[in-house]
Amino acid sequence: MKKDFEVLMGKNITVWCGIYIYHGKLVDISDHVIYLEDPAVIYETGSFEQKHWRDAQPLNVKVWSVTFQSIESYGIMNKEIDKEEEEEDE
């Protein structure tokens, strides 16, 4: 599985796990874990045709790890975290 992620290095990816959806920039890969920079948990996707996630909550950490074992699917989605909404919440 590590090899599958190597082509996505440096890109913003979305990782669908058993319970949560994670979104962030793939910055490192180990034998059992991927590392996402500026990660967010997606609680509600909204329409996949929209540019932004309906409810994306930043984890407020620089890097977050996700184990291969928990990943169901992954890829690049043309969706972003709505920075304006994030700033309003502060």
Image (cartoon, rainbow, N blue to C red):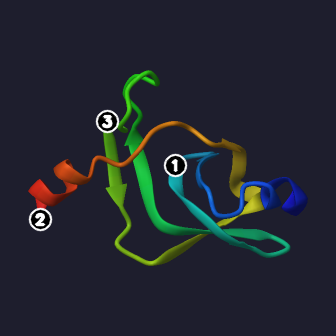
Amino acid type at image mark 2 = Glu
In the picture, the disc for residue 54 is 3
Locate residue 80, reporting x and y percent: 40, 45
Q: For the residues carrying marks 1 and 2, which lies nearer the camera in this image?
A: 2
Residue drawn 36% across and 49% down? 81
What residue is pinned by disc 2? 90
Residue under numbered circle 1? 20
What's the distance in space between the residues labelled 3 and 1, CA to CA? 15 Å
| Amino acid identity at mark 3 | Arg
Label located before the other in sequence (1 or 2): 1
Q: Secondary structure at mark 1?
A: loop
Density class for disc 1 (Cα within 10 Å; few <14, some 14-19, many ≥20) is: few
Q: Secondary structure at mark 2?
A: loop
For the residues bearing labels 3 and 2, Cβ distance under 8 angstroms: no
- Disc 3 and disc 1 in contact, CB within 8 angstroms: no
Front residue of this view, candidates 37 and 17: 37
